[in-house]
C-alpha cells in the first residue's frame, strides 16, 4: 500500500479557530463535529430545548463515522482510550502542560500541515489573523469572503453609486494591501449557483438595489439579481488582480440552498468569454455532485477542484470521492482541503484521513494499470500541496 504520511500538506480551504484552552466533553464535541443540528436551530423553530434534546443533539454529533474516526486517531495520538472523555481530558492536559500554541503546532507538525489557506468569513466576528498565525505556527494565507462585505454595505449604504464604489474599493483594498490571496463566495448558501453571466451589467445592480431599498430589504428576485451582479463584479476583480476565486459548491450546513448548489449550474457562467481568464476553485468539488466538478475541471482550463468537506466529513467515502473526481479531473487540477474549523484536532484528523484516502484511491489506479507507483507519488504531492501552492503563488 502507498504511504503518503511524510508528505507535506497545504489545506486549500479551512477556517481560523478561536483559542479555547479547556473544554468540557460536550463543548468539545460541539466545536469539532459536523452536522447533527444545534440548539439554536431548534429554538428558532419554536422547539423547547431541554436536557433530553441536548442529549439527542450530542448523540447525533458523536454518531457519525467521521467523528468516530477522529476519536480513534486522537486516542492513538494521546495514547489513551478511544472515548470522548479520555480524549478531551488528554487534550486539556496537553494544553495546560505545554501551552495552547505549542499544542496546536505539534498537531499540525504531526500531520504534515505546512500552510492553511483560510476563509476568515467564518467564524464571525472575524478572528485576528495575526494572533492566529502566531499560535498555529504554520503559513496562513487568507481569502476574502465577499458576502461579509455585501452584508455590511446592505446595512450601511443606500445609494447605488456609493455601494458600487465601496464594494470595488473594499475588494481592491483586501487584495492589494490586506494580504488576501484571493476571493471566496458562498452565494450557493444565499441564492444559488444559477448565475446569469449577463448579470455583470451595472444597471442590473442599480435596479436591484433600488428595489431592495423600496421593499425595505424584502426585495424578492431583486436580492438574487444584486448578488448575481456582485458575484460577476468579483470575477472581474479576480481577473484584474490575477488571483483565484473560491466558489462554494455542493453540501454545507443546514442553511445551504441545496437544490441550487450543483457545480453544473455554473457552466454557462464559467464558459462566458469575459470570465475565461479567471481561475476558479470549486470548493468541496460540489459533493455529493463531485463528478460534475471533475468533469468541469477536465473540459475547462482554469478550473480547480478542492476535496474539502467530503474529506473529512464523509468519513469512509474519502477514497471513493477522490477516485470519482479523478475519473475526469487531471490530478494537476485537484487540491486537498478540509473545511475544518473550531479547534486544532479536526485539522490533524482530516490531514491523516486525506492521506489515507488518497493512498487507497491511487493504489487502486496502480492495480488497474492506470498509473505507475512513481506517477502516484507525483500525483499525491500535487494534490496535497503543489497544486495549491501554484494556484495561490505561495
Image (cartoon, helix red, strand yellow):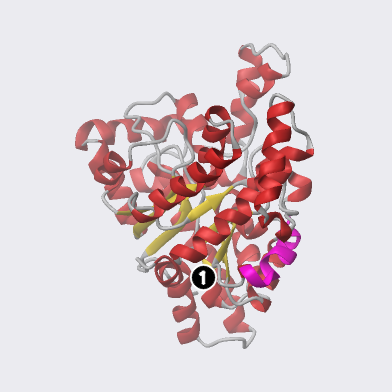
What is the chief secondary structure element of the magenta stretch?
helix
Depth check, front residue: 190 or 112: 190
Q: Is residue 278 left or right of residue 24?
A: right
Residue extent of the magenta highlight: 262-274
Q: Dot 1 surroundings within 10 Å: few (below 14), some, or many (20 or more)? A: many
Q: Is residue 344 above or below residue 391?
A: above
Report the residue at 32% width, 52% height from top. Answer: 177
Report the residue at 56% width, 72% height from top. Answer: 277
Q: Secondary structure at mark 1?
A: helix
Q: Is residue 187 left or right of residue 340?
A: right
Q: Is residue 369 above or below residue 177?
A: below
Q: Position of residue 100 (x, y in %)?
A: 26, 36
Q: Position of residue 76 (x, y in %)?
A: 39, 48
Q: How many marks?
A: 1
Residue with the mark numbered 1: 359
Q: Is residue 7 left or right of residue 202?
A: left
Report the residue at 65% width, 30% height from top. Answer: 37
Amino acid at each position: 500500500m502507498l504511504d503518503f504520511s511524510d508528505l507535506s500538506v497545504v489545506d486549500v480551504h479551512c477556517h481560523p479557530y478561536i483559542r479555547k484552552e479547556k473544554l468540557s466533553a460536550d463543548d468539545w464535541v460541539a466545536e469539532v463535529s459536523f452536522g447533527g443540528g444545534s440548539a439554536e436551530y431548534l429554538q428558532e423553530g419554536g422547539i423547547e430545548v431541554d436536557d433530553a434534546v441536548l442529549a439527542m443533539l450530542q448523540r447525533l454529533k458523536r454518531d457519525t463515522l467521521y467523528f468516530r474516526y477522529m476519536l480513534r486517531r486522537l486516542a492513538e495520538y494521546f495514547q489513551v482510550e478511544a472515548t470522548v472523555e479520555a480524549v478531551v481530558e488528554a487534550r486539556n492536559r496537553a494544553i495546560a502542560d505545554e501551552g495552547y500554541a505549542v499544542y496546536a503546532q505539534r498537531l499540525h507538525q504531526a500531520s504534515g500541515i505546512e500552510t492553511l489557506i483560510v476563509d476568515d468569513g467564518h467564524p464571525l466576528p472575524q478572528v485576528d489573523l495575526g494572533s492566529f498565525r502566531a499560535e498555529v505556527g504554520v503559513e496562513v494565507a487568507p481569502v476574502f469572503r465577499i458576502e461579509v462585505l455585501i452584508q455590511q454595505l446592505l446595512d450601511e449604504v443606500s445609494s447605488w453609486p456609493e455601494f458600487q464604489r465601496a464594494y470595488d474599493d473594499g475588494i481592491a483594498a483586501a487584495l492589494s494591501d490586506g494580504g488576501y490571496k484571493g476571493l471566496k463566495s458562498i452565494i450557493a448558501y444565499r441564492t444559488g449557483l444559477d448565475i446569469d453571466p449577463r448579470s455583470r451589467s451595472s444597471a442590473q445592480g442599480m435596479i436591484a438595489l433600488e428595489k431592495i431599498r423600496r421593499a425595505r430589504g424584502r426585495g424578492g428576485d431583486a436580492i438574487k439579481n444584486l448578488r448575481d451582479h456582485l458575484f460577476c463584479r468579483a470575477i472581474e476583480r479576480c481577473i484584474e488582480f490575477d488571483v483565484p476565486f473560491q466558489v462554494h459548491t455542493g453540501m454545507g450546513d443546514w442553511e445551504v440552498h441545496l437544490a441550487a448548489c450543483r457545480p453544473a449550474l455554473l457552466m454557462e457562467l464559467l464558459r462566458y468569454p469575459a470570465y475565461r481568464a479567471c481561475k476558479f476553485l470549486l470548493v468541496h468539488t460540489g459533493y455529493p455532485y463531485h463528478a460534475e466538478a471533475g468533469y468541469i475541471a477536465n473540459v475547462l482550463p482554469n478550473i480547480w477542484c478542492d476535496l474539502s468537506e467530503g474529506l473529512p466529513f464523509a468519513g469512509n467515502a474519502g477514497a471513493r470521492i477522490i477516485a470519482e473526481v479523478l475519473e475526469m479531473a487531471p490530478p494537476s487540477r485537484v487540491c486537498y482541503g478540509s473545511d475544518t474549523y473550531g479547534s486544532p484536532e479536526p485539522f490533524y484528523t482530516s490531514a491523516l484521513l486525506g492521506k489515507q484516502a488518497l493512498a487507497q484511491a491511487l493504489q487502486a489506479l496502480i492495480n488497474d494499470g492506470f498509473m505507475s507507483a512513481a506517477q502516484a507519488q507525483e500525483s499525491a504531492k500535487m494534490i496535497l500541496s503543489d497544486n495549491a501552492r501554484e494556484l495561490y503563488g505561495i
